[in-house]
Image (cartoon, helix red, strand yellow):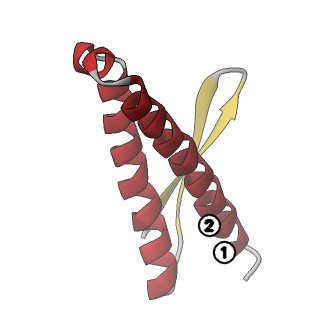
Amino acid sequence: MLILKSRIARGFDQFSCYEVEMKPYQERVVNEKFDLQVKLKALEDFANGDTFEKLPSQEQARLHLQGYLMRGYIEVLEERIDAFDAA
């Protein structure tokens, strides 16, 4: 499986790409992170749109919280992926 790792440095994504042999559960973690990033991007795009501003403030707050928690979840998945190298 081809792995694309991203690191933020000075506001820019830096990518390194390499192919590794992974166990099935590791592939699932990588796929889960990718899927979650896609969903987070969709949420962020929605939050920056006109419809979002028309929502009640309580719903806006819940969506902001959801995005915050999704970013934390992604960080945990990244740490797990980084630990694959050590396993």
What residue is rendered at 51% in x and 49% in y?
A: 70
Q: Amino acid at mark 1?
A: Phe
Where 39 sits versus 54, above or below? below
Name the side, left or right, on which 36 lies relative to 75.
Answer: left
Q: As displayed, is residue 54 above or below residue 27? A: above
Q: What number is the disc on residue 12?
A: none
Left-right relation of 71 to 76: left
Whether pointer 1 and pointer 2 mark residues with C-beta atoms closer than 8 Å, the reply is yes
Where residue 86 appears, as percent x and y from the top left, is: 77, 76
What mark, if any, has residue 81 been given in the picture?
2
Residue 50, horizontal then vertical, whole percent: 25, 13
The residue closer to the viewer here, 63 or 87, is 63
Looking at the image, residue 42 sits to the left or right of residue 78; the answer is left
Q: Label for residue 84? A: 1
Q: Residue at x 32, y 15 (%)?
A: 53
Q: Secondary structure at mark 1?
A: helix
Q: Secondary structure at mark 2?
A: helix
**22 or 42: which is nearer to us?**
42
Q: As drawn, which residue projects farthest toward the right? A: 86
Question: Within 10 Å of the Cα at label 2, are there few (<14), some (14-19), or many (20+) other Cα atoms?
Answer: some
**Image quadrant assignment for residue 45:** top left
Residue 83 appears in the figure: yes
Along the line of sight, the residue nearer the viewer: 20 or 54: 54
Question: Viewed as shown, does residue 24 lie left or right of 11?
Answer: left
Task: Quarter of the image for the N terminus: give it.
Answer: bottom left
Q: Is residue 16 visible?
A: no
Q: Quadrant of the C terminus?
A: bottom right
Q: Quadrant of residue 60?
A: top left
| Image vertical order of residue 30 relative to residue 74, above or below | below
